[in-house]
Image (cartoon, grey):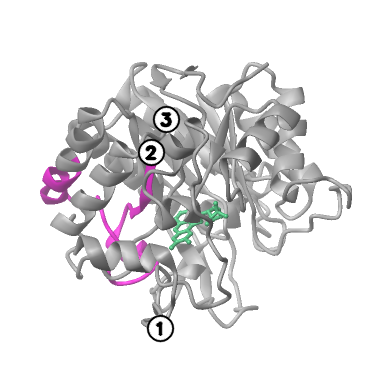
Amino acid sequence: MKQLSDSFQMGPVTVKNRIAVPAMVCFDWTDDSGRVTDRHLAHYRALAQGGAGVIFSEAVCITKRGRLHNTQLGLWEDEQIDGWKKLADACHEYGVPFLAQIHHAGINGMDDVADCPSDYTPAHAHHTPGKEMSLDRIVYIRNAFVKTALRCKAAGLDGVELHGCHGYLLSQFMSSRINHRTDEYGEDDTLFVKEILESIRIACGPDFCVGIRLAAFEPTMEDGFRHAKALAPYVDFLDISYGIDSDVSGCPADFPYRPSFYAAMKIKEMLPDMPIFCVDRITSGEMAKGALELTQIDGIDVGRGHLVNYNFASDALAGRDTGTCLHCKGGCSWGPTGNPDNPCPGKMRFLKRK
Ligand SMILES: Cc1cc2nc3c(=O)[nH]c(=O)nc-3n(C[C@H](O)[C@H](O)[C@H](O)COP(=O)(O)O)c2cc1C
């Protein structure tokens, strides 16, 4: 039976235990330069000290124009590498592998007319209009992903996770709701992602871990399964989450964890040798253990639980109370607008550490 405390192999990387810190942007912690600050360094050091098995960095942008917001961390130029070296060193001090989540926001970004698989008129208030990427632009963005991965390698990181879900550019390519191309990037909705993964592998070599955070529902679970199977030969791990307007109806109503875990369990059955992570509302050590035992996946991502308690992983592994994220609707003190009145213990912890 799998235990939370087991270490396991993810390509060239040994993960210390089965509790992972997933990507979480620290809004407004830097400025337009997109460079790592001392606050980031303290944050990631505390997460590493807290005992997680692996840390996925917050989404880091591959081009300045592709940013989600104007204070997002970046690795679009070599001058940004130094800060990432400090983050990697801090995680490695505690023996925790550190991978960057590399990202392009597409129509969820700041560009007036965003890179998009197809011309796009916003269907959501937070979307910008999208312009169909030319074949030259596809090559340019693919190369930008590769250059960012090379900067991660230069900074001493253990690998990268492509941000392939939550409606950002790669998610848009895999979504039939956005991708209406009639060329090969429409015929095979994973082609762009496969090309990026393959190019990173060639550029960074076999000792660099490469994976993807992938929607289990893009928009349906069948699509998610198809994408997982198509991408499996190109990755060392899959990290399962949600897509654009996910249709989770394929998940049985009485499944005891969030729909992402049902889909991740099914993907693990299809791809038994693939390390699979999954996320969504795991709020205690008992829940993490229960989800692991039921699904038999490999890694349990705990996002907001780690913001509430940097020591979530070590507390959960020792059977101690981890504290619980209250899931305050729209008021998360870590969100883009923040909420100074939020009583969240994460906020209090954060204030204490300043
Ligand atoms: C403040 C904040 C920032 C986030 N930033 C990212 C991100 O950069 N990349 C990403 O893939 N998911 C991001 N997420 C989603 C989390 O990784 C995670 O999937 C989500 O919080 C659900 O997991 P949880 O219930 O354990 O918190 C963010 C979530 C929060 C709360």
Q: Residue at x 70, y 27 (%)?
A: 293
Pointer 2 local density, CA inside 10 Å: few below 14, some 14–19, many at least 20? many
Element type where label 1 sits in the image: loop
x and y percent of residue 80 in the render?
15, 50
- The residue beneath circle 3 is 53
For the magenta stretch, what is the residue range? Answer: 55-84
**Circle on res. 341:** 1
Element type where label 3 sits in the image: loop
x and y percent of residue 284 in the render?
58, 46
Q: Residue at x 57, y 66 (%)?
A: 327
- The residue beneath circle 2 is 55
Three-letter code for the amino acid on which mark 3 is drawn:
Gly
In the image: residue 40, left or right of residue 283: left
Gap in angstroms between the C-alphas marked 1 and 3: 33 Å
Q: Residue at x 69, y 29 (%)?
A: 229
Q: Are marks 1 and 3 in contact (CB under 8 Å)?
A: no
| Camera-nearest residue between 48 and 142 | 48
Three-letter code for the amino acid on which mark 1 is drawn:
Asp
Queried whether the magenta region covers residue 105, the answer comes back as no
| Camera-nearest residue between 114 and 341 | 341
Identify the image quadrant of the N terminus.
Answer: top right
When the figure is inspected, residue 300 is found, relative to residue 169, above or below; the finding is above
Pointer 3 local density, CA inside 10 Å: few below 14, some 14–19, many at least 20? many
